Image (cartoon, coloured by chain):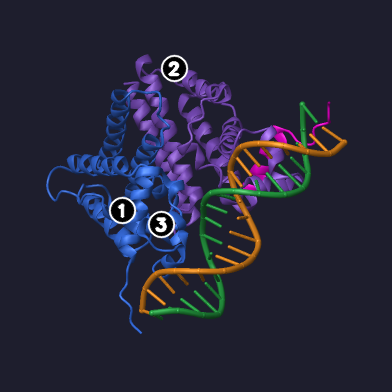
Chain colours: A purple, B blue, C orange, D green
Amino acid sequence: MGRTAQIDRAGILDAAMKLADYAGIEAVTMHAVARWLGVTPMALYRHVDSKDALLDGLVEQLLTSFPTLPETGSWADRLTAMADGIRATARQHPAVFPLLLTRSATTPDARKVRDSALSALAESGIPPDQVARTERLLATAILGFATSEVAGRFRGRDQETIDGDFAELMRWLKLAVADLRQ
Amino acid sequence: MGRTAQIDRAGILDAAMKLADYAGIEAVTMHAVARWLGVTPMALYRHVDSKDALLDGLVEQLLTSFPTLPETGSWADRLTAMADGIRATARQHPAVFPLLLTRSATTPDARKVRDSALSALAESGIPPDQVARTERLLATAILGFATSEVAGRFRGRDQETIDGDFAELMRWLKLAVADLRQ
DNA sequence: ACCTGAACACCGTTCAAGT
DNA sequence: ACCTGAACACCGTTCAAGT
């Protein structure tokens, strides 16, 4: 009969995220997460289907921690705010962030994030039939840059240079959006 | 005294690449590579320092398999040729390709690939002090797109749509380079 | 010089058993 | 309903031993 739960899905994801933040993604193992929570590894399987599902959960946590878009301001300012927010999230969780590029996440929460970007773009004045494609390319460019940054692909460059790179990327993206608006 | 070597570094990398191509990156284990080659796992350590070094070796193999840039043609055509070549490599080795974004590779061979891109850009007419930054951003954008594609982030979209996305990305990048040339 | 055998401390996951 | 114990087939890597 009923037994009070000691752990739950949220707590497991929380522990996994902290492990990743402190010790890297390869430190996120079922055994280690369980150890952190003071249970046996097998106890986790009541709450997550598999290690793969756990990693998908981490990706979803990241997606939903993106700051919500400002409702006002020019499209250019909103794009900047979104990109800055994504980059800040990357820095908070550098080990998990690269998974965003390789695990697609089609959960309801993931949809919500994408939809808010889509509606912001719809208001920017670009042709309606270009909105979805533009969102995909903007997301890919920003995710690709932030992933490269936190994964150390720009290692050797100083922070000033990397910040300059990012500013230039944003200038390119605004150039493209401006071109689409005619 | 001397004993004829049964395996070498090149053969190990070859086996690892095939394993990755056929069964995914998580199938690339020291045990599995050794099994493929008909030796014990420990035999590999005479030729590669660690599993990490093995993965770095795979990244280097990918980098050096990028087609060399055409020497002639407009800068726009050369950029297209380079991007198409990188994308083709991504499709040949979809499991290994995403590692390019997270493992920087600073070997002599990696330098050679980058240097050829840099000299092509130097001839494109953009300000000399913008060449290095432009190369980084072009590489990041193209790598980010190709990684997303082979990792299945665009899953659900049909191939025609993805090809259209890529064409549009290239248009954006050419817009940016054209802007830099004035 | 190069490979093997035995071994270690880990993995992810299943299953039956306990409360 | 939830967690544990024991177990399985794996991992990466070290070390001493064989040829």
Chain containing mark 1: B
Closer to viewer: mark 1 or mark 2:
1
The amino acid marked with disc number 2 is Ala
Front residue of B2 and A57: B2
Query: x, y percentage for residue B160?
Result: 28, 24
Q: Quadrant of residue B34?
A: bottom left
1 and 3 marks on the same chain? yes
Quarter of the picture containing the C terminus of chain B is top left
Which range of residues does the magenta coloring cover?
Answer: A1-20
Query: x, y percentage for residue A14?
Result: 69, 39
Crowd band around label 2 with a 10 angstrom C-alpha radius: few (<14), some (14–19), many (20+): some
Image label count: 3
Rendered image: mark on residue A122: 2
Crowd band around label 3 with a 10 angstrom C-alpha radius: few (<14), some (14–19), many (20+): few
- Tell me the residue at 23%/52% (across/down): B122
For the residues labelled 1 and 3, the Cα–Cα distance comes to: 26 Å
Mark 1 — residue? B63
Query: x, y percentage for residue B111?
Result: 31, 60
Q: In the visual, does B113 lie left or right of A76?
A: left
Chain containing mark 3: B
Mark 3 — residue? B35
- Tell me the residue at 37%/54% (across/down): B16
> Under tag 2, what secondary structure?
helix
